[in-house]
Every structure is written in C-alpha cells, then in structure tokens.
Image (spheres, rainbow, N blue to C red):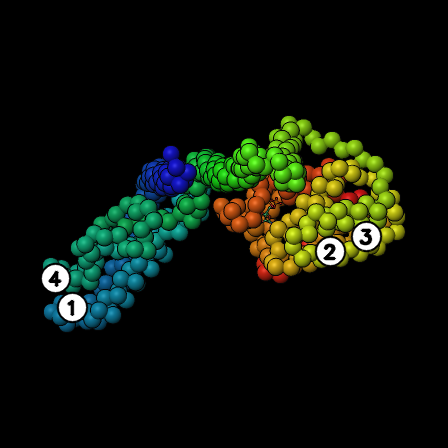
Amino acid sequence: MKPRYSIILSSSALAILVVVQAYNILITFETKKEQFDTNYGMMVRQALYGFDSQFPISQSDSLMLYLDNYGETMIYQNPDAFSFGFADTTNAKIISVYSNILQTYRNPDSYLKAYLENADADPEFKSGYYISELELLNFDRSIPIYKDTTNNIPSGLKNALLVDTYDIEGNYFKIRYTYFVDFTHKTSIIYRDMIITLALAVFTILIVALVFTLTVRNMIKLKRLSDMKTDFINNMTHELKTPLSTIAVASTTLSDENVPKNHEKVRQISQLIHKQNKHLSELIDRILDVSIWEKDQVRLKKKALNIHEFISEKVKLFEMENHAKPLKIHTEFHIKSEIVHLDEIHFTTVLNNLLGNAVKYSTENPCIKVDVASDKNLTLSISDNGIGMSKEEQKHIFDKFYRVGKGDFKTVKGLGLGLYYVKRIVDAHEGNIELHSVPGKGSCFTITIP
Ligand code: ADP
C-alpha cells in the first residue's frame, strides 16, 4: 500500500477511536448520572418520608395558617378578581409569596442534611419549591392564579432532583407544588466515579497517537531514504558509465589498423584509458568505503603533521589538478601551534571533497578562501562564492546519498557521499563541522578539531 494511503487510513482509524472513546465517556457519564439520581433520589425520598411522618402537613398549623391568611387577604382586598382575575404582575407576586411561605414554614433542608450526613452521602445541596398549580378559593368560587399545563421542568431545574409533588387545600387556597433538591457537587462526584474510565480512555488515545506519530515519522524517513537510494543508483550508473564508454571508445580506436603506427596517438589513448581507469577505481573505492563503514567504525592512523605545510601542499596539488576552470584559492594561516595530529590520507580526502564541492557548485569563476587557525583547536574553514543552499537543504547536507535538487545529476556529477564522508572523518577525529550558507551568495564549511 502507498504510504499516503496508510497515513490516511491510520488517521481515520485514530479519529474513529477518539470518537468512540468520547462516545463511551458520554454514555458512562449518563449512566453514572442515572445511578447518582437513583441513589440520591432514594435517600432524599426516604428522608422526606421521615420528615413528613414526623411533621405532617395537615398538622403544620403555622403553614396552613399563613397560606390561608394570605389567600383570604387577597380575596377580600380584590372582590372583583372572581369575575376578572388578577393582573399578571399580581399573579406573579402571589406565587412568590406562596413560595416564600413554603420555604419558611415547610423546610425539610436541615432534616435532609442530617439524614445525608448520617448516610455518608454528600450533604451539600440547594433546594426549593416549584409551584405548578395555584388557585385562590372562597366556598365554591375560585380565582386561577397559575397552572403549568405543559408539565415541562423549568430550565433552571433541569439537573435537580424533583423529589415529591404535594397537593394541599385550605379554606382560601389550593396548591400543587414540587420540592426539588440540586446537589452542588453532583458533576464532580460523577467524574470522580468515572476516573478509571476517563484515565483509560485518555491513556489509550495517547498511546495510539504516539504510535501513530512514530510510525508516520518512520514512514517519511524510509520514503526519503528510498528516494535518495534511487537517486544514488541513478547517479552511480551515470558516473560509472562515462569512464566505461570512454574506455570502450578508446579501445575501438586502438583496434584501428592505422593507429598503432602512430606512437603519439597510442600514448595519448593509453593515458586516457589510464586516467579513466583511475577515476573508475576511485569511484568504486568510495562506494566500497561507505559500505565498509556501515559495519565498522572508521579507523584512523593519526600522525603529527605540520599544518602549514600540509594544507599548502594539498591546496597547491588541488589547483594543479583543477586547472580547467579559472580558479582562485586564497589561503590564510593564523597558526600558534604548528604540529597537529591527523589521519593524513582521510584528511586529504576531506580537504579535496570540500574544495571539489566549492568548485563544482560554483558560478563561472570560483573564488575560494581557505582559512586555517590553530591554537588549542584546529579550525579550518573553506568558503566559496558558489550557488549556496537553503536552510532546509542544509539540514540534510551531511546525510548519506543526499544531493540538492532531485535527479539533476546530469548537470553536476556526484554521488551524494562526499559530505557524508567528510562528516564521518571529522566525527572520528572527535571534531565538529558547521555550515553557513546563503543561496546565491556562497557557502562556508568550518571544521573544528580539538
Ligand atoms: P555530491 O557533490 O557528490 O553530490 P556531497 O555529499 O559532496 O555530494 O554534497 C551533497 C550536496 O550538497 C550536493 O549535491 C550539493 O548540492 C550540495 N553542496 C555541497 N557543497 C556545496 C557547496 N560548496 N555549495 C553549494 N552546494 C553544495
């Protein structure tokens, strides 16, 4: 399956998992809420049953007295109300007065609180009365004040336990009301009950998300590696083909009857074959080197070198070998200690690779500056006025097989191994390599060896 499809598939699976877990949590919350309502509802009803039996409404003289007195006053003050009813504002006031009387003279709160504490339940709650029907009466005549026909619980009481509904009738009133209890810590008690479910859900999601991220990262890494390997094989085929075809052409020329008589021509052709052969074996060596490093650490044969002599000689040799382009190498030395310990062969390759890149990735006239400083550390920087690299490219520049600009191996030859080699050798010397580069301006590689 293509990586893109597996990523889409796994992200969908992850999204589904999150939705399923969220749904599970929601269901568990609802179940726990029902359990809470059942348990606490049972306790409250039992407490209220006790309260009602201890203080029956019918014997609650003060309550009946106050309810009746207020009804009577309202009726005698407004004799017209039997014909026309009360204004809406008066109705609202009457309801609020009745509610207050109930709160004051029929309040089971402290009884309920004691009962809950006794039962080891949470005793923090708010309570109240919801009046769903009220009429004022005088003998067989009545004034309707309020009647809730919808039977809808008022929105403020959605979470409250509607404990019991009472109907009472006196001489001047008839009322139906519900006592409700709203537990202050209901939600936190429910969440506390769900803690294991919640923790498991979060844990599962986190683990799956982590595995998912790691897998995607690995997949992207593998894809990049595989792309780079494909590029490498293309580059290598191309690099190997050029000297091979030159050798093939040269040998065909040699087989021409006339050529062997021309000694100068034979010399030129054999030199060409020799040069191409050398190039070929260098290429093969480089590839072999890398595959050997896969298994082994780089083994260094360090020796004491005069840094001034060493660098000057290698730079001069490089200039001689690369005279095709008008090349300018400016070398500067700031030397306090002359002798440094390096692996001469590997370090020569490092120098050649960096100088070679400065030439390869340059505009028309490469201008290279080599700066050598040595005191406690050896610092070697090679800067050029070449094409430079973007920040993103700089991140991968030392990776094996990495080359800037996919597939453009035809314009500038290379295998993407040069800087990988440089980094490995610098690491083996326990040193450090840094790159500072600006696209279009140039690059500067700085090696520090302790
Ligand atoms: P190669 O040169 O064989 O492609 P290297 O490992 O030496 O491989 O370099 C990797 C890539 O880094 C090159 O393909 C090139 O794009 C970029 N690069 C290296 N040196 C320079 C430089 N001095 N200026 C600009 N780009 C460079």
C-beta proximity under 8 Å, tags 4 and 1: no
Helix, strand, or loop for circle 3? Answer: strand
User: Which circle, 1 or 3, is nearer the viewer?
Assistant: 3
Q: Give the percent coordinates (x, y) of residue 177.
A: 26, 52
- Calculate the distance from the C-alpha at mark 4 to the C-alpha at mark 1: 12 Å
In the image shown, does 181 or 216 lie closer to the viewer? Answer: 216
* Three-letter residue code for mark 4: Arg
Mark 1, other Cα within 10 Å: few <14 / some 14–19 / many ≥20:
some
- Calculate the distance from the C-alpha at mark 4 to the C-alpha at mark 3: 114 Å
* Three-letter residue code for mark 3: Ala
Q: Is residue 95 left or right of residue 314?
A: left
Mark linked to residue 329:
2
Quadrant in the rendering for residue 270: top right
Helix, strand, or loop for circle 1? Answer: loop
User: Which circle, 4 or 1, is nearer the viewer?
Assistant: 1
Residue 18 shows in this picture: no
Q: Give the percent coordinates (x, y) of residue 324.
A: 65, 52
- Calculate the distance from the C-alpha at mark 1 to the C-alpha at mark 2: 110 Å
Which residue sits at x=23%, y=66%?
Answer: 91
C-beta proximity under 8 Å, tags 1 and 2: no
Q: Give the percent coordinates (x, y) of residue 116.
A: 42, 40
User: Which circle, 1 or 2, is nearer the viewer?
Assistant: 2
* Three-letter residue code for mark 1: Gly
* Three-letter residue code for mark 2: Ile
